[in-house]
Image: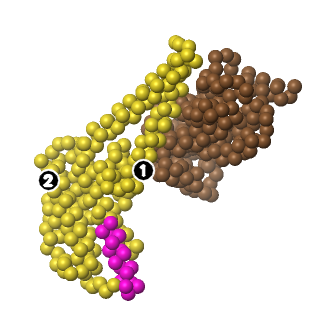
Amino acid sequence: MQPDLNRLKIGEEELERLSGLEINDVFMDDVCRPSIVHSSKKLFSFFLTQFFWFGLVCIFVLPTGFIIAQNFINLSKNIFTILKITLVISVIIVLAWNFYTWVKGKQITSLANLLDEVDKYNETVEAVDVLNRLTAVGSTDVNLVEREKVIEVLSVTRDSLVSALMVERILRQHKGLISRRHQLLTHIENNLSTLTGLEVNRQASEYGQLVNDALSIGISVQQEMQNLQS
Amino acid sequence: MWHFTVLIVLLRDRERFLREIRQGVKIKNKIAALLISSAIFLAIYGAIIGAYQSWLQVLASAVKLPALYLITLVICFPTLYFFNVLFGSVQSLEQQFALLLTAVSITSVLLFSFAPVTIFFLATINSYQWFLLLNVTIFAITGFIGIYFLYQAMKPVLIPTINVTDGERDADAAADEVNSVTDPDSDSKKVRTKILQFWLGLYAFVGSQLGWTLRPFFGAPGQPFELFREREGNFYLAVVKAIGHILF
């Protein structure tokens, strides 16, 4: 990837620094990202993790349950009853954990939406990179002036996303009125105006489509911020 | 399969992994991955040693072996954490737990690496006592290596001023130097080193007793499947008895 595009990408480390949570494709901290339902690979990863957690809970609960039960009853006569009880306890623990993460997830819906926008943004940056490579091998004829415009659009979009993530974190952590919040929100709205004002031949070229993508990300970010304000 | 990716990073670049733990980078992710991957490796090895007797023993040992290591860790962890905090450690609960899990994970990977050897002897020998002794030896070797790595991993926590990336300096020499010359809080750190040594003894002691409580892991051949045996004797007595059976 070209250096300017590489700098534009928003990586996991930066996301973690901005959000204050551990982020990957499937989870935000302990919470499952809603967008996994759109990807079979991520969904598989989620269910595999759930299966492993259930196994791990069984590993802790089953022997502990049997050792405790051994003190009170004849183990050999009641083995299947104890097995059923410990398995039910394991299922309850896993369900309780999932309920807890679901409740926690409802409090960070905005972050989940912003992370989805970051994913779209990163995909757009990668698409620009693919276009660049195709241009380099002469497979497609793309206007280099438009490339510069797209980089500018992406840069502004990145700026908006970073600001939005900061706002979300401030509101999540303090849940109050913070003066910096208004400053950042104004910044995002200004960025959106800049995006809509940039002159690129949006209908006719491959780059134009990418600009549209970046613009829709910018609009989504602004909508998310409006939701946070209300 | 990000769980195994984290473990591979631990094995390939331990210094970086430990540095990330000390810096608090992706701690929850690391704990989850190490818990899951070590449980899987231990369960596989447990299943192999259980195969000496029956399918039921395979299932029982696949649960019991990871339980032995992980429950022992959970039982002993608060002792280490609170003693360390009392004597000036600034590491968080999650950081200390992640450091301890690295030791269990290394032990589990080493046990897994012994799996082909164990399977080979499982298929070719017919002596229960021999198989028992072979596995006690494997558990001892892997356990000592795991504890050695834990001790090394905890050292920079005890003496945080060491530059771990400096390959030219010997870490032990640097630790002594820092302790004796520049560190004003060296007494507290020496106490924490002693606490770690005491804790390792406690971990081994609790582990062997829990192992004895959870037995059988192997299951004596020709006898019906038992989930747990009656409580009698202790681990050390059983090892002496097994050696006696082979020698006399």
Q: Quadrant of the C terminus of chain B?
A: top right
What amino acid type is highlighted by mark number 2?
Gln
N-terminal of the pair, mark 1 or mark 2, is: 1
Q: Nearer the viewer, residue A189 or A53?
A: A53
Report the chain shown in brown: B
Q: Is residue B22 above or below residue A201?
A: above
Residues shaded magenta:
A123-139
The tint chain A carries is yellow
Residue A102 at least partly seen:
yes
The question of residue A131 being in magenta is answered with yes
- Estimate the x, y position of residue B195 in percent, counting from the top left: 57, 31
- Residue beneath the point at 49% across and 36% down: A56
Q: Nearer the viewer, residue A118 or B145?
A: A118
Disc on res. A45: 1
Q: Are marks 1 and 2 in contact (CB under 8 Å)?
A: no
Residue B190 at least partly seen:
no
